[in-house]
Amino acid sequence: MLGHRCDNPLCQWVAPGHVVVSSAQENRREWAQRKELAGSPLGDPRGARRRARALRDMARRDPREVAAELDRLRRLYGEQMQLPLG
Ligand SMILES: [Zn+2]
């Protein structure tokens, strides 16, 4: 399987350096390690998938809300890699 470095469960971007060859076991192990890192976006109590869905739904409603929400999340949980546009 391919493991994403962005920790965004909705991500479909496949590019060198963004995804790595992994296994389900290795992916779970890395997730558990990164979740415990101070400032990790995986520390969001909603969980990575709910966080990603909330941001996606917000972008559909009003894209202007997303920048403010990302700033808030960045202060609370750290940086989450941006998805490429286009
Ligand atoms: Zn990704």
Image: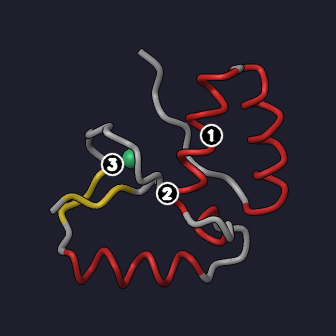
Q: Tell me whether circle 2 and circle 3 mark residues in contact (CB < 8 Å).
A: no
Tag on residue 49? 2
Query: Is residue 44 shown above or below 84?
Result: below
- Nearer the observer: mark 2 or 3; the answer is 2
Q: Amino acid at mark 1?
A: Leu
Disc ID at residue 39: none
Q: Nearer the viewer, mark 3 or mark 1?
A: 1
Residue beneath disc 3: 17
Q: Are marks 1 and 2 in contact (CB under 8 Å)?
A: no
Give the camera-side residue of 35 and 45. 45
Pointer 1 residue: 55
Callout 1: helix, strand or loop?
helix
Q: Residue at 71% across / 20% down in the picture?
A: 62
| Outermost residue to the top | 86
Horizontally, is 32 left or right of 15 in the view? right
Whether residue 5 sits left or right of residue 3 in the image: it is right
- Report the front residue among 22 and 73: 73
**Could you tell me which residue is drawn at 41 percent across and 53 percent down?**
9
Label 1 Cα crowd, 10 Å radius (few <14 / some 14-19 / many 20+): some
Assign a secondary structure to mark 3.
Answer: loop
Looking at the rendered image, the quarter that the C terminus falls into is: top left
Relative to the observer, which residue lies in front, 59 or 20? 59
Q: Quadrant of residue 67?
A: top right
The secondary structure type at the circle numbered 2 is: helix
Above or below, comparing residue 70 to residue 48 in the picture: above
Q: Amino acid at mark 3?
A: Gly
